[in-house]
Amino acid sequence: MAATTADSEFEALDKRDARALTEYMSVLDDVDRARGAPNLFEVVSASGSSYLVDTQLGSCQCWNDKTTAGPCKHRRRVAFATGEREIPDWVNDDAVDDQLGIHIDNGVSR
């Protein structure tokens, strides 16, 4: 099976992946702007900033997603939290944020 664009965006773990896995962020699937939209997720960071991630369009409202190559940490967090992207077995479970995936239906937890 050929890799899709979304798959190729997420091939290797890097610094943004580390931030997506370890920083405190809540991924919410049915609140505020994401309510009733299956491809939208509200990501709230530790600072209280909120970003809308659209998994269908592959976009996030944050500045970093618009100005740098590759997906931002918010899009990556959604991919990990929803199971779209598997967390490699070698990742240190103690370093992964305990909140990963707990606020969404069928979310991933470690």
Image: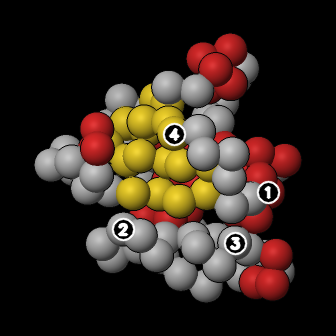
Of mark 1 and mark 3, the one earlier in the sequence is 1
79 with respect to 13 (left or right): left
Mark 1 or mark 4, which is nearer to you? 4
Closer to the camera in the image, 44 or 17: 44
Of mark 2 and mark 4, the one earlier in the sequence is 4
What kind of residue is marked 2? Ile
What kind of residue is marked 4? Ser
Residue for badge 4: 50
The quarter holding residue 91 reads bottom right
Task: Assess disc 2: are there few (<14), some (14-19) or many (≥20) residues with their C-alpha within 10 Å of its C-alpha.
Answer: some
* Mark 1: secondary structure: helix
Quarter of the figure with the C terminus: bottom right
Of mark 1 and mark 4, the one earlier in the sequence is 1
Residue contact at pointers 2 and 4, CB within 8 angstroms: no
Of mark 2 and mark 1, the one earlier in the sequence is 1
x, y percentage for residue 86? 57, 69
Mark 1 → mark 3, Cα distance in angstroms:
10 Å
Closer to the camera in the image, 102 or 18: 102
72 with respect to 81 (left or right): right
Mark 2 → mark 1, Cα distance in angstroms:
21 Å
Q: Is residue 49 visible?
A: yes
Task: Assess disc 4: are there few (<14), some (14-19) or many (≥20) residues with their C-alpha within 10 Å of its C-alpha.
Answer: some
Residue for badge 2: 104
Mark 2 → mark 4, Cα distance in angstroms:
16 Å
Q: Identify the residue shown where x is 58% and y is 73%.
A: 99
Of mark 3 and mark 2, the one earlier in the sequence is 3
Residue for badge 1: 18
56 with respect to 8 (left or right): left
Closer to the camera in the image, 6 or 104: 104
* Mark 4: secondary structure: strand
Q: Identify the residue shown where x is 84% and y is 47%.
A: 15
